């Protein structure tokens, strides 16, 4: 299972999410990249990231079935590559 | 134009590809072009918007700011500003600053006339502004032929000013024509020289482009040359997804392969009229007006025209073509302005169906607006091909006859009997 699941992430501060009927459009004001989140569930997960200690927790809160965690981990990894989401510094335990 | 009372609910399928979702439209455009003025210092032969003269109804500074406010509310993250020549609007720099301060990024297209060293330094210091300089030939000869004398030097001077000011990654925007397809490598070299990115777009038969399309549009073998070049260089070159009709050659080009008109793309013209796409400035594609119809959001979300464009389209004559899924029938504007049916092949269909359609009976629609200058100007393109004529060479061998030659019949040659009728 992907490592990202056990890490703490959040939406990048430079990114705005625009709701769309199919999900959302994410725009990065810094690198000007435009990305589409094609499922409303993924939008929910991305929005929940900052409130949860790790990705697994956010997926659970969004009601994503465990069998789909791998798919979501891959989607989040792709969003991380363009800095749409950013890894949070390890917070004091 | 009609604005519906309530927002139409499209029967949108869930899931599917992004392209399928885009066909049903978005809550706000992702690629909005806004032409700020019809005034222009040039008179390019192929101008999409038939620009030249300012329209007295053009939006005021305050009206433009209200549009920007609405774009911010709708989360339209950036606009492509054009014209005419937008930088000759006296409030251009003010509006640019206002947009950036309201989280609406700007890419503006210019012929370079106002990109002085001072402006270039200001642009270099501003984040969130992109500059796109138009250049339609890699040499002055090819460029000035359609854009007018001196326009090549103006564009290159602007690029040099931007580079000297430290402005990173300007765009060089090229409309691909029969005359410049052979210069693609040279364009790339110019872009590299100025630290810029090359952007290639398709010549549309829109505006004054309708008058010169027959002469300027790439020949079938040049379409192939362009496709091959894009396949080899596509990663480092922008296209505005304008060549999706070429996807019918085989492998799809990078980007969106669909007509975005009224779905993800639209145009606001200088008087606030909203058209389905920047290449379709014609009453047939007029959705509404930002002043008369309650703002841009209302027009985008409720106009009858856009609702229709977002409903499933039939491929018409193209449905049975094996390549329909790649090219989706091509460009709506290119079909409309060449008088072809909208549900038939693109005039430049790479499978050859366009040529057959063009050979059939068709009538080219009359322009519904024209802001061209009424009088010729000194920097207007002349579009004469310079070549040596055999008889001119012969004539030059004999001394010219001056007006005050003694013999009143000097230079007169009697027609040979029996040859003239």
Image (cartoon, coloured by chain):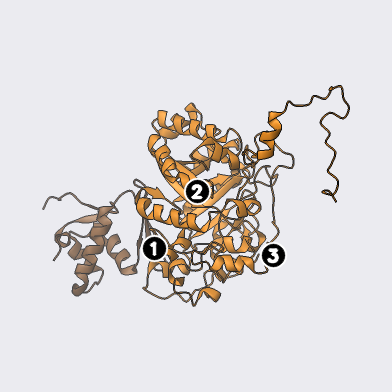
Chain colours: A brown, B orange
Q: Which sits earlier in the primary sequence, circle 2 or circle 1? A: 2
Mark on residue B252? 1
Residue mark closest to the camera, 2 vs 3 = 3
Mark identifier at residue B363: 3
Q: How far apart are labels 2 and 1 at the CA level?
A: 25 Å
- Disc 2 or 3, which lies upstream in sequence? 2
Q: Is residue B128 visible?
A: no
Viewed as shown, does residue A62 lie left or right of B198? left
Q: Which residue is mark 2?
A: B80
- Which sits earlier in the primary sequence, circle 3 or circle 1? 1
Which chain's residue wears label 3?
B
Q: Which mark is residue B158?
A: none
Q: Nearer the viewer, mark 2 or mark 1?
A: 1
Tell me if mark 1 has few (under 14), some (14-19) or many (20+) residues whose alpha carbon lies within 10 angstroms of its own.
some
> In this rendering, does residue A81 appear at all?
yes
Q: Chain of mark 1?
A: B
Indicate the position of residue B217 as horizontal and vertical percent values: 56, 53
């Amino acid at each position: 299972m992907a490592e990202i699941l056990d890490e703490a992430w959040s939406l990048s501060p430079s990114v705005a999410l625009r709701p769309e009927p199919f999900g959302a459009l994410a725009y990065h004001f810094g690198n000007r990249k435009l990305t589409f989140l094609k499922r409303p569930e993924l939008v929910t997960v991305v929005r929940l990231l900052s409130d949860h200690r790790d990705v697994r927790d956010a997926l659970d809160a969004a009601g994503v079935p465990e069998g789909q965690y791998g798919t979501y981990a891959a989607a989040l990894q792709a969003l991380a590559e363009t800095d749409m989401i950013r890894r949070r510094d390890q917070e004091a335990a | 134009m009609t604005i519906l009372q309530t927002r139409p609910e499209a029967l949108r399928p869930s899931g599917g590809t992004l392209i399928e979702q885009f066909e049903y439209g978005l809550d706000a455009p992702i690629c909005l072009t806004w032409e700020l003025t019809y005034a222009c210092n040039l008179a390019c032969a192929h101008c999409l918007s038939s620009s030249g003269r300012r329209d007295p109804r053009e939006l005021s500074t305050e009206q433009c700011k209200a549009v920007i406010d609405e774009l911010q509310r709708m989360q339209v993250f950036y606009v492509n500003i054009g014209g005419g020549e937008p930088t000759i609007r006296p409030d251009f720099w003010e509006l640019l600053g206002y947009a950036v301060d309201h989280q609406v990024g700007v890419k503006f297209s210019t012929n370079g006339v106002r990109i002085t060293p001072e402006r270039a330094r200001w642009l270099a210091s501003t984040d969130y502004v992109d500059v796109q300089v138009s250049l339609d030939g890699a040499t002055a000869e090819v460029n000035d032929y359609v854009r007018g004398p001196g326009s090549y030097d103006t564009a290159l001077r602007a690029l040099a000013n931007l580079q000297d000011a430290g402005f990173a990654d300007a765009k060089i925007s090229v409309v691909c024509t029969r005359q410049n397809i052979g210069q693609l490598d040279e364009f790339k070299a110019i872009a590299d020289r100025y630290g810029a990115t090359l952007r290639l777009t398709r010549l549309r038969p829109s505006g004054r482009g309708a008058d010169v399309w027959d002469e300027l549009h790439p020949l079938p073998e040049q379409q192939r040359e362009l496709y091959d070049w894009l396949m080899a260089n596509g990663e480092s070159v922008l296209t505005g997804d304008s060549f999706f009709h070429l996807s019918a050659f085989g492998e799809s080009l990078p980007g969106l392969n669909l007509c975005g008109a009224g779905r993800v793309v639209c145009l606001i013209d200088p008087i606030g009229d909203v058209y389905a796409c920047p290449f379709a400035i014609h009453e047939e594609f007029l959705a509404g007006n930002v002043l008369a119809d309650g703002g841009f959001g209302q027009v985008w979300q409720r106009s009858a025209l856009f609702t229709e464009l977002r409903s499933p389209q039939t491929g018409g004559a193209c449905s049975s073509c094996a390549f329909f899924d790649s090219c989706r029938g091509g460009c709506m504007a290119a079909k409309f302005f060449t008088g072809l049916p909208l549900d038939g092949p693109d005039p430049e269909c790479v499978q050859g169906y366009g040529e057959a359609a063009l050979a059939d009976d068709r009538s080219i629609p009359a322009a519904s607006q024209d802001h061209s200058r009424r009088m010729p100007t000194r920097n207007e393109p002349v579009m004469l091909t310079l070549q040596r004529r055999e008889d001119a060479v012969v004539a030059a061998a004999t001394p010219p006859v001056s007006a005050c030659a003694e013999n009143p019949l000097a230079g007169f040659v009697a027609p040979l009997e029996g040859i003239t009728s």
